Amino acid sequence: MEAYAKAHRLGIDSENHAREIKFLAAKRMGELVPAETGGRGKKKDAEVRQVSHQRLSEFRKFAKVPEPEFRERINDLKQREEKITYSRILLGEWYQRSDSIEW
């Protein structure tokens, strides 16, 4: 959906709507897929690994953010008409992470 919105120049709202759905699904996957319990070669792990290790790790980080806060972060980005990204959901803006402007 995001690629379609970009290709047809539907605007940031349409692109963010697709991203919102994608990230909510990713959060849900992070909640549902348990942490690894065995070696890489086991059949059970292979069934879970339709997603890369890195993606699954990202999804689990999403799962740690409480649902209301997760949706609030997404809605804030949508209201400011900024692109919803993985890092903006988890980290926010770099200048908001500190009370001080000093490095």
Image (cartoon, grey):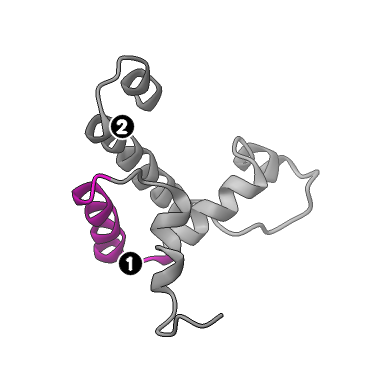
Q: CA gap, disc 2 to disc 1?
A: 24 Å
20 and 42: which one is in front? 20
The residues colored magenta run 64-81
Q: Position of residue 75 (x, y in %)?
A: 22, 53
Extreme top residue here? 8
Q: Position of residue 67 (x, y in %)?
A: 29, 61
Disc number for residue 103:
none
Q: Which residue is mark 1?
A: 66
- Marks counted in the figure total 2
44 and 89: which one is in front? 89
26 and 81: which one is in front? 81
The kind of residue on which mark 1 rests is Pro
Q: Is residue 14 left or right of residue 33?
A: left
| Secondary structure mainly formed by the magenta segment | helix
Disc number for residue 15:
2
Q: Quadrant of the C terminus?
A: bottom right
Q: Quadrant of residue 12?
A: top left
Q: Is residue 20 left or right of residue 41?
A: left
Q: Determine the residue positioned at 80% across, 43% down.
A: 41
Dots 2 and 1: beta carbons under 8 Å? no
30 within the magenta span: no
Residue 18 vertical position relative to residue 103 in the rendered view, above or below: above
Q: Determine the residue positioned at 41% across, 51% down.
A: 27
Q: Quadrant of residue 3?
A: top left
